[in-house]
Image: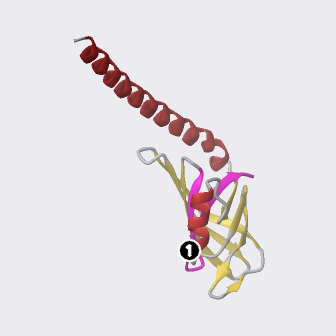
Amino acid sequence: MGLVLVLNCTAQTHKENRAERSELRKSEQQNDFKSMSSWIHSRNFVFKSGTMESKQVSNLYEKQVHGKSVIKINGSLVRITGLNSSEWWKTTSCTIDNWELTEIPQELAYSISFIARSGDSNTAVLIKVLNDKTAIAQFGGREFRGQVTRN
């Protein structure tokens, strides 16, 4: 009889621990989402593809054929380096037009779109940033996966 009680208590403790860990993880994700808000709203961040904190994810991305890019946003200016067709762009400094920032609270994500203008050249840029600071950027007909950090 005592063994049944001990097993039952142990099973209940594991369920409670799992629920607590799940709640803690959700709380941490919510805090990460909120902490990114200030530098995303102030337009002060950098997107780098192929640089992830997790080695497993990084190796996965490096095996893909996406290439590498950097998008450095500082206020109303953006500096872009990336692939266009089969050759590297030179680093291009542009002004930002039509900035649209959408918070997606149910996904704990941000969606950013803008036009990078440099002389006669206009490039549409889309970036989706997740609460773990991973991101997907699309521009120049390509998709890049990487991470965002504060500028």
Q: Which residue occupies the foreground of this view, 58 or 4? A: 4
Looking at this rendering, what residue extends furthest in the left direction?
A: 1
| Residue 101 magenta-highlighted | no
Q: Image check: 28 left or right of 106?
A: right
Residue 66 locus on image (x, y percent): 58, 75
Looking at this rendering, what residue extends furthest in the top direction?
A: 2
Label 1 is placed on what type of residue?
Gln
Colour scheme employed for the rendering of this structure = secondary structure
Residue 84 locus on image (x, y percent): 64, 83
Residue 42 locus on image (x, y percent): 68, 48
Q: Residue at x 43, y 34 (%)?
A: 22
Q: Image check: 3 left or right of 17?
A: left
Looking at this rendering, what residue extends furthest in the bottom direction?
A: 86
Residue numbers of the magenta segment: 133-151
Mark 1 surroundings: few (<14), some (14-19) or many (≥20) residues within 10 A: few
Q: Please tell me whether residue 89 is drawn above or below residue 79 in the rendered image.
A: below
Q: Which residue is mark 1?
A: 64
In the rendered image, which quarter contains the N terminus?
A: top left
| Residue 148 magenta-highlighted | yes
Q: Residue at x 31, y 16 (%)?
A: 6
Q: Please tell me whether residue 87 is drawn above or below residue 103 in the rendered image.
A: below
Q: Which residue occupies the foreground of this view, 97 or 132? A: 132
Q: Residue at x 46, y 36 (%)?
A: 26
Q: Which residue occupies the foreground of this view, 129 or 126? A: 129
The secondary structure making up most of the magenta span is strand
Q: Secondary structure at mark 1?
A: loop
Q: Please tell me whether residue 115 is drawn above or below residue 55 in the rendered image.
A: below
Q: Residue at x 66, y 80 (%)?
A: 83
Residue 122 locus on image (x, y percent): 64, 77
- For the image, the number of numbered tags is 1
Quarter of the view holding residue 46? bottom right
